Amino acid sequence: MFYTFMTRVVRPILWLLFRPKVEGGENVPSYGPLIVASNHLSFIDSFIIPLAVPRPVTYIAKADYFEGGGLKKSFVRWFLTNLGHVPVRRGARRAAMGALEQAAEVLDNSGAFAVYPEGTRSQDGRLYRGRTGIGWLVLESGARVLPVGLEGTEKIQPIGASWPRFFGPRPTVRIGPPMDFSHYDDMAPAKARRAITDEIVETIQKLSGQDYAGCYNERADHQQTT
């Protein structure tokens, strides 16, 4: 019921406020397990992507978003919980693996789960090396990966800004064809996780047009497995 409300009421409102330009929308599979992998520039990325992907998408979200008092915190906690977002505490390896195991359950039920391979938002606009939690998830689930490149979301809500700029610059969402990694099944798991992750990040870079940093974003504090 909540997703129906989101689709029929909230989604049109958000579309009007943000007016995203979507390229490659025809690449989104309408059914089946799907890992949505994107670069991460702004808090609102988790709101922009569902506007471009016409099916329910579950996210890993910082545990901080589910904690604290006040009107804003309470609304964010209610909103993310009803969307089925999975909280994970940054820096806790066991918690991160627990979140990925929950992601595998979503995929086992033919759902769509979104992951930011970098682990956290980029502060300088560059694309950082991916953490191999997404590689583990691909091998565990066998799901295809939908690569997404975001551009301009950091102009709508820069890091540190409390609220987005409604009716501001239009962000762009570029969606590539689904990626299949079944050809890595016979590779050693550790090498396969790294190779899958690198291939996904390389594809995201082509879609987003970002410069590649070539190193981890240390702000992630090893939120995902490396």
Image (cartoon, helix red, strand yellow):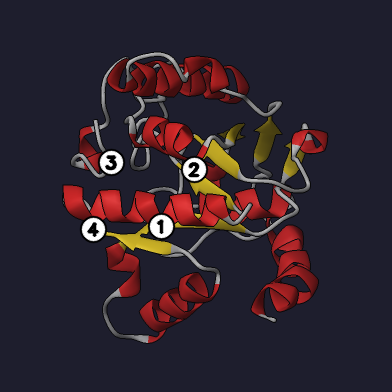
How far, Cα to Cα, is label 4 from label 1? 14 Å
Q: Which of marks 4 and 2 is in front?
A: 4
If you read the primary sequence from the N terminus, does the residue marked by circle 4 or circle 3 appear first? 4
Q: Nearer the viewer, mark 3 or mark 1?
A: 1
**Alpha carbon distance from label 4 to label 2:** 23 Å
Q: Where is residue 48 in the image (x, y as percent from the top left)?
A: 62, 52
> Considering only order in the chain, which callout, 2 or 4, is on the residue closer to the N terminus?
4
Mark sitting on residue 62: none
Q: Please, which residue is most extreme toward the right here?
A: 26
Nearest to the eye among marks 2 and 3: give it.
Answer: 3
Asked whether the beta carbons under mark 4 and mark 2 sit within 8 Å of each other, the answer is no
Closest to the observer, 162 or 121: 121
Q: Which amino acid does label 1 sit on?
A: Gln
Q: Is residue 6 visible in the rendered structure shown here? A: yes
Secondary element at image label 1: helix
**Sequence-wise first label, 1 or 2:** 1
**Which of label 1 and label 2 is nearer to you?**
1
Q: Residue 89 bears which disc, if any? A: 4
Name which quarter of the figure residue 11 lies in: bottom right
Q: Is residue 175 above or below residue 54?
A: above
* Badge 2 or badge 3: first in the primary sequence: 2
SS of the residue under disc 4: loop
- Give the residue at mark 2: 154
Q: Please, which residue is most extreme toward the front here?
A: 186
**Quadrant holding the C terminus:** top left
Report the quarter where the N terminus lies. bottom right
Report the residue marked by disc 1: 102
Query: In the rendered structure, which amino acid carries the disc numbered 2?
Result: Glu
Q: Position of residue 93 (x, y in %)?
A: 18, 47
At horizontal 78% and vertical 47% (from top left) the residue drawn is 30
Quarter location, residue 224:
top left
From the image, tell me which residue sits under label 3.
224
